[in-house]
Image (cartoon, grey):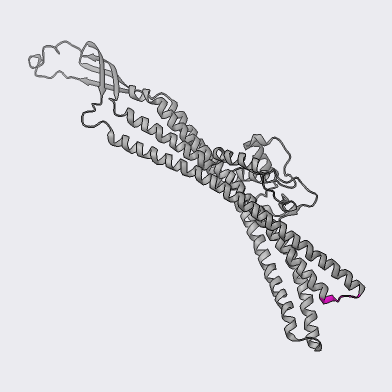
Amino acid sequence: MRGVDDPQVGQLIRAQIPSRGASSWPPSPFTLDDLLAVAQVENRTLKAARADLQAALGTARSAAELPNPTLSLAADHYLRSQMGTAQMGTAQVGSAPWLWGASLDLPLTALRNRSLQSALAETRVRTARLDYAERLWQSRREIRSAVLTLQVGNAQMALAQEALRAATTLDEAFAHLVAMGETAPAQRLTASVARLQAQRDVASAQARRVAGETGLAHALGLGVGAIHGLALPPLLQTAPSAPDAARLAALREQALLSRADVETALVQYDATELELQREVRAQYPQITLGPGYTYDHGLRKVDFNASLTVPLFNRNGGAIAAAQARRSAAGDRLEAAQATALADVDGTAAALEQSLQALTAARALQEVDMQVAARTQREMQEGAADRLALLTAELAANSSTQNALSALDQSWQAQGALEDALRSPLQPDPPPRNAEQTVH
């Protein structure tokens, strides 16, 4: 299986996504847009949605074409029998033995409804486009979430391993003191618990790294082995930010236009309106013309036939009522989609503000604990503190750093939730840095 950085992947992207230009491949590090481009050419779910869009475009072209007339042919031949001409009709004696004819059926009503059918097909094209756009956004969301999960797992692994080393050293030191009778066994419990917690944190971080790798590979439509060694966008090198009130208000209004679920509900309402028009037209006579030509045993005849449905027993009232009900339901769904979009934006914006406040508090506590650890380091060098005090301070600083990392993770997730509500990125991809995080 080819990897993400395979030049062939770049060739596919340049061929299928011309808007990306002729940039070199692979980029380093990859941005979210780069990874999304990989998913567009490798993820089979996206390929199926693109095929559905092509099918809808073909249906729209077919609906816009003129309906073909129906050609009918007829022929008969009479045989002269041994019974003689006395038993034959006098009109047939000496005449040509063949009758043949041709006629065309022209569906005038279908011609009249062609524009309506074409408009209905266009709504299906719009729905397919919106479905593809929504699947693209879902892929971007999955990629972003997987990258964040993987990078947080890597950072947690480093902190957990550092904490495990410190906790192990502290536990062994207390074990030595207990063996020497210089402290009670109960004093060792805190160090033992810290060591067990660090072991648990190492396992949790490893599980998170695996989940991030698996999620990223699934979002790209590739195997896990295809993303090893991949330089990822450095999300954790910066903190997210909340938009100000003016920008949030503008984005809130834009969400009513950019969210695919809202626009899909609008398209479905338009489709039900067109279906209602079609049912209303169906209550009137449906007309078909059939000009023709007949050669009748030597006589040439021109035929002209017309047929129409007679609205004698019903005026299509049931179908019209059903179409009106569907239009009403589509209107309710449109209003519900708009209300859901606005509620999502308001809720996720508030959650982002709260997560940023929690991040600020966590970083403040981290700074205090790191200052305590640095002061304890100096005191130990001056002889005013021992090794146990330094290890305890370092574990406290490590725990605060892990809490700050979790708060940063939560704030990035909150920003991602707001972007999902808006269906729009709040900020561009982070710029490339010298320190790249890679998938190991």
Magenta region includes residue 173: no
Residue occupying image coordinates x 80% and y 89%: 181
Count of labels in the image = 0
Compared to residue 422, the image places residue 300 above or below, namely above
Compared across the picture, whether 284 is left or right of 267 comes to left
64 w.r.t. 143: above or below? above
Image quadrant in which you'd find residue 426? top right
User: Percent from the top left, x then y, of residue 17?
Assistant: 63, 37
Image height check: is 382 above or below 238? below
Residue 211 location in percent, x, y? 63, 59
Q: Report the residue that reaches farthest toward the front.
A: 245
Q: Main secondary structure of the magenta part?
A: loop
At horizontal 26% and vertical 24% (from top left) the residue drawn is 308
- Residue at (91% x, 72% y) in the render: 381
Q: 236 or 135: which is nearer to us?
A: 236
In the rendered structure, does residue 384 fall within the stretch colored magenta? Answer: yes
**In this view, which residue lies farthest toward the right?**
382
* Quadrant containing the C terminus in the rendered view: bottom right
Q: Residue furthest bottom?
A: 181
Observer able to see residue 234: yes
Identify the image quadrant of residue 274. Answer: top left
Rendered view: 259 above or below 75: below
Instruction: In this rendered view, identify the residue nearer to me: 2 or 218.
Output: 218
Left or right of residue 66: residue 84: left
Q: Residue pushed farthest left?
A: 86
User: Is residue 145 in sight in this rendering?
Assistant: no
Q: Nearer the viewer, residue 10 or 100?
A: 10
Magenta stretch in the rendered image: 383-388
Task: Give coordinates of residue 53: x percent, y percent.
Answer: 51, 37
- The image shows residue 85 at horizontal and vertical percentages of 10, 14
